[in-house]
Image (cartoon, grey):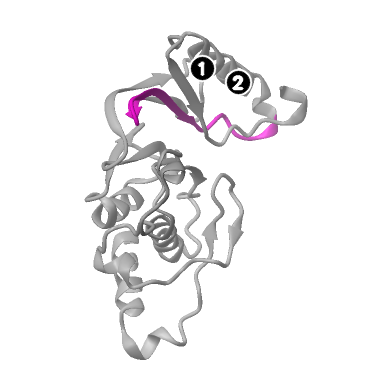
Amino acid sequence: KLETDMEQVCAVGESPEKKTNRKEGEENTPGSGTNEAQANPAASVCSGDTAGTKENPSEEENNKLSLISWNVDGLDGEEQPERCRGLCSYLLSHSPDVVLLQELIQPYIRFVKKRLAANYTFIEGGKEGYFIGMMLKKSRITLLDSEIVPYPTTQMMRNLLVAQVLFKGQKLCLMTSHFESCKPQAKERKRQLRLVMKRMTEAPDDVTVLFGGDTNLRDAEV
């Protein structure tokens, strides 16, 4: 049902008589669970155009790694097709090297793959329910290895996704996670944080570790 709705949204987006009157969909702000009405309703999201890149970027810009962490709130059905389409539009516009995603569901990830698989390698931290994932730009990031690290005592199907990659000759260890939700789960969140920190400290000296995700941590918990 979600994928059918998404295709219908795209069909509307590409209709000439609808373009000028279509209301912009809300999308999740990168790195948060909040919404903003700034989705770019570009038809390229639906047509499968390749991700845009800057013309003749400087050497300094070319050597910088761009990364986005985004909780897509896939479990929230409100305006879900528009929000998923807004995600694709944002990624096409900004063309980040690394995308760390939380609260994915299968229809969501299938829709995004259909639009962006030519440009990105996808890594999923699960298949059932909702899960985390990564997208790595093929032209900039070389995937060496990946693994899913379970949280032994999670009650919400949470885990840690780790990817070993190369960027401009530099070894990187990319991590993303979605820690246990809700205030009563503070102890579990802190256990998950300790596990992540332990994995970070175990990285070799020549590897740079980058973590991004939705930790749900309160000030008193860190």
In percent of width and height, residue 150 lies at 42, 19
For the residues labelled 2 and 1, say whether their Cβ atoms are less than 8 Å apart.
yes
The answer to whether residue 10 is magenta is no
Figure quadrant of the N terminus: bottom left
Residue named by callout 1: 153
Q: Which residues are magenta?
A: 164-183
In the image, 50: left or right of 129? left
Front one among 46 and 132: 46
Q: Residue furthest bottom?
A: 17
Mark 1 neighbour density, 10 Å: few (under 14) some (14–19) many (20 or more): few
Is residue 122 shown above or below 55?
Answer: above
Q: Secondary structure at mark 1?
A: loop
Residue at 26% from the left image edge and 64% from the top image edge:
49
Front one among 200 and 57: 57
- Looking at the rendered structure, the kind of residue marked 2 is Glu
In the image, 21: left or right of 111? right
Figure quadrant of the C terminus: top right
In percent of width and height, residue 157 lies at 45, 29
Q: Earlier in the sequence, mark 2 or mark 1?
A: 1
Residue named by callout 2: 188
Q: CA distance from mark 2 to mark 1?
A: 7 Å
Q: Secondary structure at mark 2?
A: helix
Residue at 39% from the left image edge and 42% from the top image edge:
97
In the image, 194: left or right of 100? right
Q: Residue furthest front?
A: 59
Prevailing secondary structure of the magenta residues: strand
Residue at 51% from the left image edge and 45% from the top image edge:
71
Res. 82 image quadrant = bottom left
Is residue 102 in view from this perspective?
A: no
In percent of width and height, residue 212 lies at 52, 33
